[in-house]
Amino acid sequence: MLFIVLVIAFRQPLADVLWPQTRIQSLLDQADQALRAGHLDATDGSGARQLYEAAQALDNDRTEAADGLGRVAQAALRAADVALGQGRFDEARAHLALARDLQVPRPQADALALRLRTREAEHAGVDGLLAAAARAQADERLWGGDDTALPLYQRVLALQPTRIEALEGREDALSDLLQEAGSHLRRGEIGEAAARITSARTFDAGHVDLPQAEAALAAAVDARRRAGARDLARGRLASARAAYEAVLSAAPDDGGARQGLEQIGIAHARQAEREAGDFDFVQARHELGLARELAPQSGRLAQAEQAVARAREVQQRQGATASLGARERERRVVALLARMAQAEAQGQWLTPPGESAYDTLRAAQALSPDSPAVKQAATRLLPAVRNCYEEELRANRIRRAQACQQAWQTLQPRDPALVDARRRLAEKWIAVGTERLGAGDLAFATEARDQAHALDAQAGGFAEFEQRVQSATTGRSP
């Protein structure tokens, strides 16, 4: 009983295994039926083509499937002819493509293709298209819409590939378009030039004037990228940004320009810190906005935001204590110095913001800058900040070392030792930046160059390191 049930359930698969010729004949019969019905091609496998191909895959030695595919090709050619006679051009084109796929004799396919283009041209009114293209060209409307010269010439050539008027018109229009691109390049409008050169390439990649135009564009992009780097190094942030954005308008994937914009954002973050130090919070907010726009992921942005917040807190404390009496002022100074001592004991020289030894000292200085106790606290904190600088520098924690150096400079701006500290910090940025550049981290290397330049542009190795970063930024071999 079990055997009978299995045979009934799996009778077709068993038949395919035991009698494969039966399966092949079934496919051939279905294919013949689809061919007689005119069902030549179907994505669901029910077309004559797919059924003959399935039979052929099961047994490549039998000729019936190959013969059937030949009949499908001829049927497709006849169907294309019928569709062409009835003006159904898309259908005729689809049947012709099927015939070509199935290796119909090429002379037959080419003859039908020529008839198809001729009928399409007659239907579309090629002479009218040519006249419209000529008018658009005379009006200097060369590209940018379906009714402009180049797209119209392209439509004519799609219908009549050897039409002399269209070939000559397209050649002249492309020359005019590339001349426009040259004019934009001379005016420094490299984005406009790039758009025209790209369009010309799509219409005729072999145009005789195209290589020269592309070379001129590449030179202009390179020059603008280098101008951006020079402006950035000199602190001309607005012009550097304009240069890098012009590069991206012509080459959206340019890595050097994107890195340059990020460095401009970091420079704005540093400027925000300086403005906050002068309590100019309107300008500081403006600089922070530019930094967020250009370098939203930069660690320097977060550092600047903290610096602005600290400065605002100091200003608020000063405002809150402006009308305090001497007794209350002294009481608050004592409390701040106590908090400073506690932060010192915990090694919290610069963090957390607002509660570090450095921040509480600045708050005490804001309350009573001439207080002997405050001056004594500053004198006591200075060696700790110096030690912080040395320890962080030895450990290659370069950003923390720089934070300690900045605190040192704030506490004793005329300390002669600061000159050497700035030089050593610049050299550390150069050393670490060189190592990271070798590992492919261009973003860090660029930041290291900018930080070293700000600290000491005469530091050992800076000129060579700057050249390597510039070469990597502009895509040239260092």
Image (cartoon, rainbow, N blue to C red):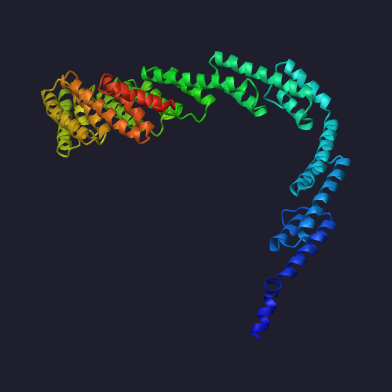
Count of numbered tags: 0
User: Is 157 on the left or on the right of 1, as rendered?
Assistant: right
Residue 62 vs 463, above or below: the answer is: below
Residue ranking furthest to the right? 85
The residue positioned 79% from the left and 57% from the top of the image is: 67
Q: Position of residue 381 (x, y in %)?
A: 15, 29
User: Is 381 on the left or on the right of 26, as rendered?
Assistant: left
Residue 30 vs 290, above or below: the answer is: below
Residue ranking furthest to the bottom? 1
Q: Can you tell which quarter of the image residue 315 is in? A: top left
Q: Quadrant of the N terminus?
A: bottom right
The residue positioned 65% from the left and 19% from the top of the image is: 177
Near-viewer residue (91 or 309): 91
The residue positioned 50% from the left and 31% from the top of the image is: 253
Task: Tell me if I can see residue 276 in this picture.
Answer: no
Q: Position of residue 185 (x, y in %)?
A: 56, 16
Task: Tell me if I can see residue 389 in this picture.
Answer: yes
Residue 68 vs 431, above or below: the answer is: below
Near-viewer residue (352 or 9): 9
Q: Quadrant of the C terminus?
A: top left
Q: Position of residue 391 (x, y in %)?
A: 18, 34
Q: Can you tell which quarter of the image residue 111 is in? A: top right
Q: Position of residue 171 (x, y in %)?
A: 70, 21
Residue 423 vs 114, above or below: the answer is: above
The residue positioned 65% from the left and 29% from the top of the image is: 202
